[in-house]
Image (spheres, rainbow, N blue to C red):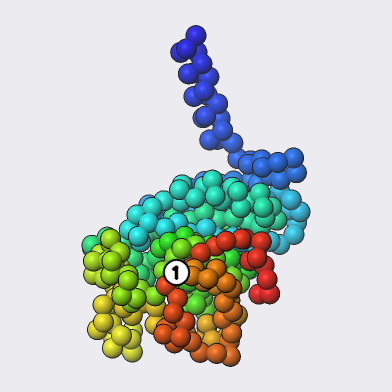
Amino acid sequence: MINMVKCLAVVVLISSCKEKTVKLGKDISFQKEENVHYGNDSEQILDFYLPHQESSKKKDVFMIIHGGSWRGGDKSQLTFFTLSMMKKFPDYIFVNLNYRLATATSSGIPNQTDDIENAIQYVEKKLKYHPKFILLGNSAGAHLSMLYAYHFDAKKRVKAVVNIVGPSDLSDPGFEKYTDYSFVKNYLVNPKAFPECLQPLLQAPSAGWILLPLLHSPIMETRIRLFLYLKKEDWILFSPKIKYSMKAMNLTAGIWIGIKHLMISF
């Protein structure tokens, strides 16, 4: 009897894994595609969720980006979170992203920001239109979300960034206490991948200069974004009319405290 129950459980598990529809309530369902390759590397895979609601309407995209100190983690850690977000926002497309992890022989940046770009291009090609993207990351994934949106998103496809406890200033002295600081300092960034005009910045440790292009990017100076300040849990409005210095911003981390606030004036 026990063996029969175990076999039945295995059959149910296999069938649910093969199921291509995710039902999240009476009127909420998504078509899912798991472990879809958006690049040639084995780590360049994503899960894609397309809502059945108003299927003819062009929808924008939540892209979920996991953390893990830039060299670890997996999208599976945020699958339950992604499903909960899908239930709250049933009219959005969702992408849960894996990216190439940093190693001592393969730097995270620019590989990881390139992977966000590659995934966005893949989604656009799949949908056959140009949606706006909301990048939602936690920890290292939040840092990559901000870095991509404010420095690499030349076509302005990102309309919002949600930073969940992600570092924004890797040059902050407190960051040196981070357990993986030595790895970040020595291996996070590949300086050879950047143009000669940035070489003066590259003389400093990578953890010290990586945010500078982000803050002084022309992309950031022409947009409005919202950021959550960890210390006071207040909204801070990034105005396109004001150029912030790292000292004036004094931001070391952000935290997401209510996704319902996300859709305010973008």
Q: In front: 220, or 131?
A: 220
Q: In front: 118, or 17?
A: 17
Relative to 5, 40 lies left or right: left
Relative to 92, 146 lies left or right: left
Badge 1 marks a residue whose secondary structure is loop
Q: Amino acid at mark 1?
A: Ala
Residue at 28% over, 88% down: 200
Relative to 44, 71 lies left or right: left
Residue at 62% over, 60% down: 259
Q: Residue 242: x and y, percent?
A: 55, 90
Residue 2 in sight here: yes
Q: Is residue 150 above or below residue 2?
A: below
Q: In front: 247, or 155?
A: 247
Residue at 49% over, 24% down: 10
Residue highlighted by disc 1: 253
Q: Residue 261: x and y, percent?
A: 65, 65
